[in-house]
Image (cartoon, rainbow, N blue to C red):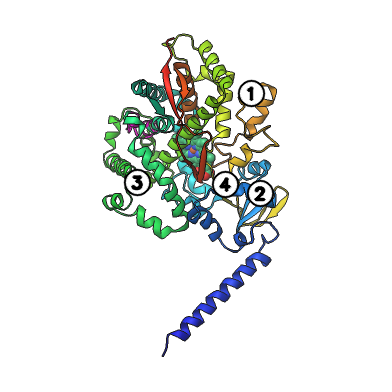
Amino acid sequence: MSVFGPVVAALVACTTWFIFRGITRLYFHPLSAFPGPPIAAVTGLYKAYIDVVAQSSFVHNLERLHAIYGDVVRVGPNELHFANPEVCQEICNAPNRWDKEESLYHSFGEDRSSFGSLTYAEAKPRKDILTRLFSKKAIRDAEHLVQEKVLGLCDSFLRTGERSVDLFYAFRCMSIDVITYICFGHSVNALESPGHEAPIILAMDASLPVFVRFKYSSLYKNMIIKCPPNISKVVSPATKGLVNLQVAIKEQVVDLKNNPEHLKTLPHNTTIWNELLKPEVHPDGRVPDIGSLFEESQAFLFGGADTTGTTLMHGTFCVLEDPEVYHRLKAELQQAWPDLEDAPSQSTLETLPYLSAVIRESLRMSPGVASPLPRVVPASGTKLGGNFIPGGTVVEMSSHFVHRSADTFENPNEFKPDRWMGPGGKDLEKWLVSFSRGPRSCLGLNLAWAELYLTFAHVYRKFDIEVDPSSPKELRWRDCFLPEYLGPHLKAKMTPVKA
Ligand code: HEM
């Protein structure tokens, strides 16, 4: 019998089913009334095309879509993106314990971490333990550890001498050294790498587009993630530095889990292991398994290093673009910190109005986490921006839309620290959502603030900074959940000040 007949029949059946499903999603779906590109309503491949095939930036595409369709856009068969800042507050607020959306949050291979757990119930026990470690008080107590790495950054500038420093890499080296030192008690000493080109930093950068592809194929993800490290380094040489770090962290997890007495050999007791390896802190009285501990570590690496490094670099780019901002910042620091040998604490730095305003404006302007943060509406449905949204719908909003809203921030594309000063400044803080809000907001925000205050203060107080002509005229980035910066890096000559 010829196979031709059954093949044709199968093709016709498939085509009919796809057409039927497309028409249903377009005209008879509960989200049919929401505007958006018809192809997005029909298939999730619309987003896959933008992310993977066109390798375009989804957030930038959203700007275009909102300009055409208005405040709410249907960006997938079951997915809505909002542009109205009020809706961001409605989605991410304390009482809302909505689930994270699976295809994104399980694309990083950190499913059992506080970041990757989909439900609030799953994330809470872990977050309760780690929140203590990253509380304001705990980070104040660990301030000297952060300061040690900030001083390391300044020393690395001195070693560079007359040559320009790649500030994109340098700030990331500092933040990865902080995270690995504070969280694991074992700094990777990225700051000592020649030209700040630490293999781990290059590898984390190279992994960003790989994670985007993982979102659309768990088969591909499992092939790479579950691959033995030696093979993975051959298949994907760009991410070799990351694989080496993963191996080192796995070894550390195995060692500490099997020999808890080795915890005493860590240089301080602020590491995540000091907490996570205590059976009594876990509700079930059991230490999590090695895989789960490892996934938590990876979440901290990515969550804590790139984000802070991005804010420092992006903020510095903006400060250096405006000589008035640069000189006002330096003048304030010089006055508050007259003797270079007597560095102020973070709490003193926090009283400096212009420094604080520069940091807030840097957070606003930089795409720390670029992507929309998708959440699943509970079964009862909800109201967002005045619209009823049926249960099960994926709703999302990128902080980019809050931070660049002209209704909230006057001339939103301009770097104006003054907007955070004076009576209006306090009211604006509600709209600074870099760390997200609600029960799944950033766990490391106190550490991030410490890094931002100490680094901005030390760098601008101790160095005169002159932009290298090879630096970009504007910063271009692509949404890979975290931003992937495109084009040349920001470079500058760092000349130590005399006093
Ligand atoms: C300027 C720096 C930072 C920015 C802009 C930032 C931003 C964010 C954002 C927007 C989220 C929510 C993500 C989501 O809902 O998908 C988040 C979550 C998280 N961040 Fe940060 N972060 C920063 C620094 C840090 C640091 C230093 C650490 C580590 C110590 C950290 C650890 C985490 C963790 C573990 C989560 C997951 C929390 C959860 O899902 O419940 N972050 N961060």
Badge 4 or badge 2: first in the primary sequence: 4
Mark 4 vs ligand 1: CB below 8 Å:
no
Q: Which residue is mark 4?
A: 59
> In the picture provided, is 245 more to the left or to the right than 284?
left
Q: Amino acid at mark 4?
A: Val
Q: Which residue is mark 2?
A: 66
131 versus 331 height, above or below = below
Measuring 57% from the left and 46% from the top, which residue is drawn there? Answer: 59
**Residue 180 painted magenta:** yes
Local SS, label 4: helix
Q: Amino acid at mark 1?
A: Asp
Local SS, label 2: helix
Instruction: Using the numbered discs, state the Cα–Cα distance from disc 3 to disc 1 in whole angstroms.
Output: 42 Å
Q: Residues within 10 Å of mark 2 (few under 14, many from 20)?
A: some
Give residue 44's position: percent from left, percent from top. Answer: 55, 60
Q: Which mark is residue 418?
A: 1
Decide whether the magenta segment is chiefly helix, strand or loop.
helix
Instruction: Using the numbered discs, state the Cα–Cα distance from disc 4 to disc 2 in whole angstroms.
Output: 11 Å
Q: Return the residue nearer the eye: 151 or 387.
A: 151
Q: Amino acid at mark 2?
A: His
Q: Which residue is mark 3?
A: 238
Instruction: Using the numbered discs, state the Cα–Cα distance from disc 2 to disc 3 in whole angstroms.
Output: 36 Å
Closer to the eye: label 3 or 1: 3
**Magenta stretch bounds:** 177-191
In this rendering, the count of numbered labels is 4
Badge 1 or badge 4: first in the primary sequence: 4
256 versus 417 height, above or below = below
